[in-house]
Amino acid sequence: MSAVEELVGSLTESCRIVCPVCSEGRKKKNDKSLSVTVKSDVTLYTCHHCNIEGGVQNKQWVMPPPKQPPVKIPKQSASPLIEEYLSSRKIDPSLINKFGLVSQPKYFRDVGEQDAIGFVYDRDSDARAVKWRSVKTKSWTQQGTARTFYGIEFVDPSPQSLVICEGEMDVLALATVGITAVSCPNGAPSKVSNRKVHPEEDKKFSYLWEERELLDKVEKIILATDDDPAGEALAEELARRIPDGRAKCWRVQYPRNCKDSNDVLIKHGANALRNCVENPTPLPLKGIYTADEYLGAVEDIFSKGLGGGVSTGISTLDELFTIAPGQLSVVTGLPSSGKSEFVDQIMMNLATQHSWKFAVASFENPPHFHISKLAEKITGKSFHPGSQNRMTKSEMTEAYHFINDHFVFLDNKDGVVSSVDSIISRTKAAILRMGIRGLVIDPYNFIEQAEGEEHLSINAMLTKITTFAKAHDLHVWFVAHPTKVYPNEKGEYPVVGGNHISGSAAWFAKADVGITVHRSEQSTDIHCWKMRFKWLGKQGAVPLSYDVVNGRYSNYVDTTLQAVPTGHWSDDF
């Protein structure tokens, strides 16, 4: 590898740098003539002075799942059992050989031994899995672990469109009418709430990472999932995770009383099924929505009420605000008031209690140090030697593994200043790979700003962040420092709020939730100076206790303490 390739290969963000090839021979030795463009799979470079150009294959910053050993596949032979079953489902029996279907008796936990059909995954390489379906019941069992789409070997390497359905039988039904499709190896999620996938199901979507290049470059994705709450949740989660998913995903609409593609084929025939897939509904249509797009959400509000967000994990804090996806929380406070520790506590509570996963761009905390602080919040013990209540090595290891499963760190090892675009790009990859539901940026002043007036640059940055959060059902916490403030004649510092944040009034205007962390002698007071939606919280303040040993925030218990006054800050806004 040449010097320029080695240098370029170490970068994680697009930038302009000094060219190592021609800079020494130039008068302008510090001229940044080498343009570097970082993409998901390759980093491209070109020098605008000496014209050297090329590309370096990227090493992925997230490790892919380990390769699974091959499973033993029964020998394929003529099977009247498979032919009879497929014919009963109106599926072309000639597909048996194409898809490598097999059959043999299999044991099912709920019904015992029964005749079964086997769907072989990843046949182009050593088979990693076989999913078995009973021909008499809907029982399933599996050998190995399916980690990629079923039927992916028949998809063109550079397709204009990709049809994704829920089960293997739907793939065969669509193949019968001449449509190439793939199905999700885990089907629809088992845990669904308000037509959304529960965070505990996140690991079941690792197969998307296996096909990230295909999903990134395909222009149109047709979601042919089942017409039920689980199928709708699956479609929504796929659209959330796939890069630019909601902009290029379309949803198949089935005839009444039809649940899936195979159902349409049985009840209405090949032409009807082909018509459904060839005329999907856009999701969305260039940012324009009909009332039908919101019918499910409207019905939920009608039957269940507005409800609230996800618990913060601290009961008294829940009385002030809760957490909802698709929102921006701006957190401010005086220096050393505990802003970062407070956000860490909220993240850890959401991770331990609700299985949320996070991308963290913490510029003032190196990842190894940040991990040690998160470990303290998990164990409730000190990480460092010399403490009487220090965590054991086994406790540290257990905490580390939990953090590894629930957090990724957007680090800048190459020394290039982060831009908001690079943070969004890396977070998109984390959403695809892990199902990230929260993003923390701490603090804002470490982010590269566009040239021009600061308040306009901040406004544009926050617009990008809020748009990104809504598109991916992501909650974003943005930590921002206030302008310099001075104490009063008693030496007391005021409680800062959204309009005290440096650089722009957009911090107040763009925030869905505005939080100030303010330390007093008795407690750490959490002030909510903005709450866009009243069903998620309210303006006000609550005191919390802070444990300096383990960094934990908890309910403040003091029956003599009066309610924290809020007028001394609310009058400023």
Image (cartoon, rainbow, N blue to C red):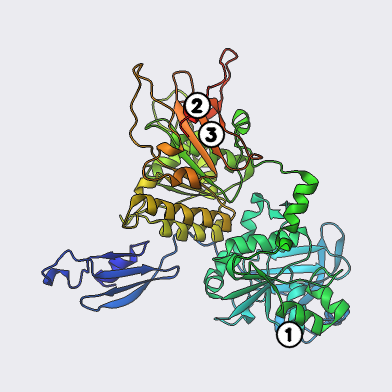
Helix or strand or loop: what does disc 3 sit on? strand
Q: Is residue 461 above or below residue 19?
A: above
Which residue lies at the image location 62% right of the left edge and 33% below the top edge? 318
Q: Assess disc 1: are there few (<14), some (14-19) or many (≥20) residues with their C-alpha within 10 Å of its C-alpha.
A: few
Secondary element under disc 2, as helix, strand or loop, is strand
Relative side of 348 to 319, left or right: left
The answer to which of 493 and 229 lies nearer the viewer is 493
Residue type beneath disc 3: Cys
**What residue sits right under mark 2 in the picture?**
525
Mark 1 = which residue?
Answer: 97
Name the residue at 73% across, 82% down: 175
Amino acid type of the residue tagged 2 in the rendering: Asp
For residue 126, the mark is none
Check disc 1 and report its element: helix, strand or loop.
Answer: helix
First in sequence: mark 3 vs mark 1: 1
The residues tagged by marks 3 and 2 sit, at their Cα atoms, a distance apart of: 10 Å
Q: Nearer the viewer, residue 486 or 238?
A: 486
Q: Is residue 284 visible?
A: yes
Which residue, given by chain and number where applicable, does mark 3 sit on?
A: 528
In three-dimensional space, the C-alpha distance between marks 3 and 1, rounded to whole angstroms, equals 63 Å
Alpha-carbon span between mark 2 and mark 1:
68 Å
- Between disc 3 and disc 2, the foreground one is 3
Q: What amino acid is found at the position of numbered circle 1 in the picture?
A: Asn
- The answer to whether residue 329 is above or below residue 171 is above
Q: Residue 92, located in which quarter of the rendered image?
A: bottom right
Point out residue 470 in the picture as x, y percentages from the top left corner: 57, 55
Pick the quarter of the image with the N terminus.
bottom left
Left or right: 110 in relation to 457: right
**Against 274, is 183 above or below?**
above
Which label's residue is closer to the chain start, 2 or 1?
1
